[in-house]
Image (cartoon, rainbow, N blue to C red):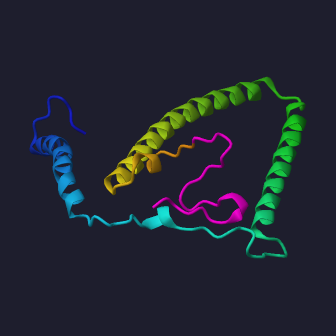
Amino acid sequence: MISNGDDSPRARRWRALLVLAPALWLAALPAVRAAAPSGHAPGGEVNLHLPSLRQGSFFGLNGHQFLLGGLVVCVLGLFFGLVTYLGVRKLPVHRSMAEISELIYETCKAYLIQQGKLLLILELFIGTVIVAYFWMIGFPAGRIVIASDDPSARLRTSGSIGPGGEPYRPLT
C-alpha cells in the first residue's frame, strides 16, 4: 500500500490518517464518557435473559433433549468417518498417487498453519475490541473479564442459564 520511498499525496494522506485517528479517538473519549447519563445501565445483548431450554417442546422433546440428540448424531458421524477412514487406509495405492497425495497433504498443512495464525491474530483483535467496548460503556473490570472465586461454579455471565435452569440475573 505505502512504500518507504512513496511521497505521493495519497501516501501522505494515509500517513496522516494513521497518526491522527488514534489521537482523535483518545481526545473524544472523555467527552463521550461525560455525555453519558450517570444512571445509565448498558443495554444490548449483555442484559438479555435467555429462557430455559426445558420450556418448549419440539417433536415431543424439550430443547435440552433435542440438543443432546444432536450431539449423539455428531458422535455417530465421527464414528462412521473413523471406520470409513480406517477401511480406505488399508486399500492398495499406486506409488505416483501416494506421492501426489503427500504433496497435497503438505500443501494443505502449510495452508492450515497460516490460516490458524491469521485466526489467532483476528481473535486477539476482536477480544481487544470487545474489552474496549465494555470498558468505554462503563462496565467494571470484574464484569468484563469472566472470573469466579469458586472453582466449582458454572460459567456465569449475563444472560446465561444459572443453576436449576433459571436465567442468571446480571449484577446491577
The mark total stands at: 0
x and y percentages locating residue 35 in the rendered image: 21, 64
**Residue 150 colored magenta?**
yes
**Figure quadrant of the C terminus:** bottom left
Q: Identify the main secondary structure in magenta.
A: loop
The vertical placement of 97 against 1, above or below, is above
Q: Residue at x 39, y 44 (%)?
A: 128
Q: Nearer the viewer, residue 98 or 144?
A: 144
**Residue 16 colored magenta?**
no
Range drawn in magenta = 149-172
Q: Nearer the viewer, residue 166 or 120?
A: 166
- Find residue 53 and report its image quarter: bottom right
x and y percentages locating residue 114 in the rendered image: 51, 33
Whether residue 61 sits left or right of residue 136 in the image: it is right
x and y percentages locating residue 133 in the rendered image: 36, 53
Q: Residue at x 90, y 37 (%)?
A: 87
Q: Residue at x 69, y 68 (%)?
A: 52
Q: Residue at x 59, y 53 (%)?
A: 156
- Find residue 10 and report its image quarter: top left
Whether residue 122 sits left or right of residue 27 in the image: it is right
Whether residue 110 sits left or right of residue 126 in the image: it is right
Q: Nearer the viewer, residue 132 or 41?
A: 41
